[in-house]
Image (cartoon, rainbow, N blue to C red):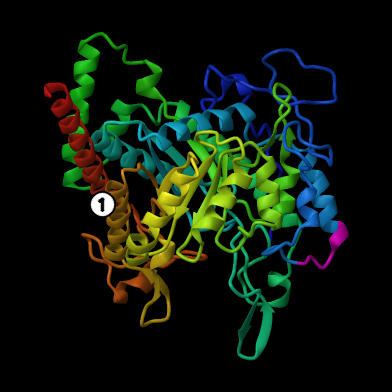
Amino acid sequence: MAAPVLPVAPLAPAHLSPFISARRRSSLASSDPPRRRGTGPSVRASSSAPAAVTSGWAPDSWRARPVRQIPEYPDAAALGEAERTLASFPPLVFAGEAWTLEERLGEAAMGRAFLLQGGDCAESFKEFGANNIRDTFRLMLQMAVVLTFGGQMPIIKVGRMAGQFAKPRSNPIETRDGVTLPSYQGDIINHDDFDEKSRAPNPQRLIRAYSQSASTLNLLRAFAHGGYADLQYFLRHSTQGDRYVELAQRVHDAIGFLLAAGLPPQHPMMTTAEFWTSHECLHLPYDQALTREDSTSGLYYDCSAHMLWVGERTRQLDGAHVEFLRGISNPVGIKVSDKLDSSELVKLCEILNPHNKPGRLTLITRMGAENMRAKLPHMIRAVRQAGLIVTWVCDPMHGNTISAPCGLKTRSFDAIRAELRAFFDVHEQEGSYPGGVHLEMTGQNVTECIGGSNTVTFDDLSSRYRTHCDPRLNASQSLELAFAIAERLRKKRDRTWTSLISKVEA
């Protein structure tokens, strides 16, 4: 592995960041003398000091709880040194950015916005590059255009990017040809090559993950605010099939109307895009090291990402991951499978969102179409009966993983679409809001999921199968799915208008 290179000027100053709402720009506390206004954030690394409003919690209180999915490092001293190094680095994101995202997600909880969350199953050191980041960012913008036009509502764009390096595994060890080694757990922990040195957890990988995350954020911020997200430019230079071209022309015509009506072409609404980052809260030493206290509120934020989620294997009520997440103020997601009992789900929500703040909690369902229809209604009713405010989101990927005849893991596009259809059907039946979608996808032309209009078959899988973990939708499949979701959003909007008109006429 090449020696990690720390980023130079890894962050745009807070007052210049396109991710921060003008209504909420926040610096982070520091024990150093105050800096001049506009020179960037001052920060205080997390310690064992208790959070201002969370009883009995500290950034390191998770260490007294049962811990899962975090490997045992051969050199504990080296891990501690890496944690201290990370704690001395600047934050990757700011409190005000996470606060704004929570506000947007609160709108999705009320049916007034829709979350599009997507990106790699696991980011890779080897495949890191500007083109990959650009292609995924562009794909999410394309999908957002489709969804905005169909739903006539704001689309909240959150990438599984700039920190999605760790992966939970069902088995901590792997055996090949009689040789047993630790399982590959993502590039932040070890390497996927099957040899003893590669599979040993290496603390220096935490530093490299930070460096790559900082570089990714730099590029995302440049794309979001530097002209690439200009809607007119974007529509002229995006081609992804006749169906998208037709929609792009309709959007272009609508923009022409707005310009004729007096909207300046350089208005930020036309030239910039809000974009946030997220990852699974799995490697707690990394997340704790990047936790900071907000000087304006006394609240703690995990400044490694705007949003984090707790996974299927780590959401135990008394577990370390839930303990850590209950004390940070970022928006938090919970992966919800058919194995989670409704009463336990309610308890989990109450632990992670005791003040019932809109936008704080996103429930990401992942259970397959059949289980979705059988289990989700009971969960929705239990959450509603408890008076909890949550944003319901569908992850149609993880409940649909199968093994191809060649032995590779894959997912069927038809099964993914069927689970999304079930998600919308259940929410329509229950009178609740379908708040978003969570996808493992890439802007690259890979062949990892079968099906779609371009028909990837089992025989095609090996031709461009590049994932380091789970199979992803390619650009064409992702956009096709966006059109299907947009159609459901349009039908929901039409029903709402019809109902309102009927009430007015009555």
**Depth check, front residue: 439 or 405:** 439
Residue in the picture at 42% in, 76% down: 408
Residue 438 visible: no
Figure quadrant of the N terminus: bottom right
> Hey, what amino acid is under mark 1?
Glu
Instruction: Determine whether 333 is above or below 237 in the image.
Output: below
Q: Where is residue 344 in the image (x, y as percent from the top left)?
A: 56, 57
Q: Where is residue 482 in the image (x, y as percent from the top left)?
A: 29, 47
Which secondary structure lies at badge 1? helix
Residue lying furthest left: 505
Figure quadrant of the C terminus: top left
Q: Name the residue under label 1.
A: 480
The magenta stretch spans which residues? 72-77
Residue 468 among those drawn in magenta: no
Q: Is residue 60 left or right of residue 272?
A: right
Instruction: Determine whether 504 is above or below 224 in the image.
Output: above
